[in-house]
Image (cartoon, rainbow, N blue to C red):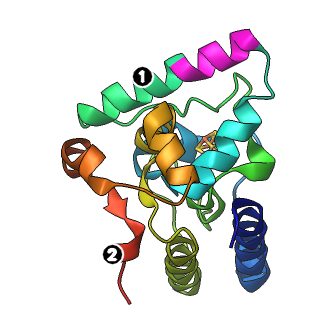
Amino acid sequence: MDLEEKKNKLRELYDRYEEAVAGLKKAATCVVGCADCCIGVGDIDITTLEGVVIRERVATFDRPLQAEIKAGLAQNKAEREQGKLSRCAFLKGDKTCMIYDIRPFSCRQLYSVKRCNGAPPTIHRQAVHQARQTVDKMQRLDFGGYSGHISYILYLLDKEHFRRLYLHGRPDPRKIVDFGRSHGIVINRFVSG
Ligand code: SF4
């Protein structure tokens, strides 16, 4: 399967998840401008395939915005390495997402049936189960790629050598072994069967 087909399959997985939880999400209390999930961005993990989609979108932005995002991601990475949560580099000043239509699955699965007020979101158990199944399918789709925090995966994809190996279907975990271990990067082919 080539990269374009994989990107189409990824969108289908997003859509299937949304269809499966549409009824449950009717109970969500989330409103535009509430961005608690995006400010405590500790758990926003992505696959390399999602990272490629995000990079392609960022490449369409003007240069100053690209530079701003790059600096924001570097800050996310540094804060994450210090064990701190941080504001997502894609969150705009009005607390909306600048990549909303292509946001990663970690963001799509988050909603809450109670106002969070700083606490973790309250999500239906069925939706959590559905989300786990979707993540498993996404990792199989991105077989041989990687999963990890958004700032770490985008950091790796920014490295030309890593990107070239990944895009040509020849990821080489030995090249990132130290970074991968110390940053909790998962190799998608080792995900549970
Ligand atoms: S990518 Fe968008 S939705 Fe996801 S955490 Fe960042 S700002 Fe929020």
Question: Is 43 left or right of 138, judged from the image as shown?
Answer: left
> Where is residue 67, by image quadrant?
top right
Residue type of the residue flagged with mark 2: Phe
Q: Where is mark 2, residue-wise?
A: 190
Q: Is 93 in front, or is 33?
A: 93
At x 56%, y 87%, the residue is: 126
Image coordinates of residue 135 in percent, x first then y, are 52, 73
Start-end of magenta stretch: 63-70
Q: Main secondary structure of the magenta part?
A: helix
In the figure, 77 relative to 185: above or below? above
Q: Which amino acid does the dot numbered 1 rest on?
A: Gln
Q: Quadrant of ligand 1?
A: top right
Q: Is residue 177 magenta?
A: no
Whole-Å distance between the Cαs marked 2 and 1?
Answer: 29 Å
Describe the element under mark 1 as helix, strand or loop: helix
Which residue is rendered at x = 69% and y = 48% of the image? 53
Secondary structure found at label 2? helix
Extreme residue toward the top, this view? 64
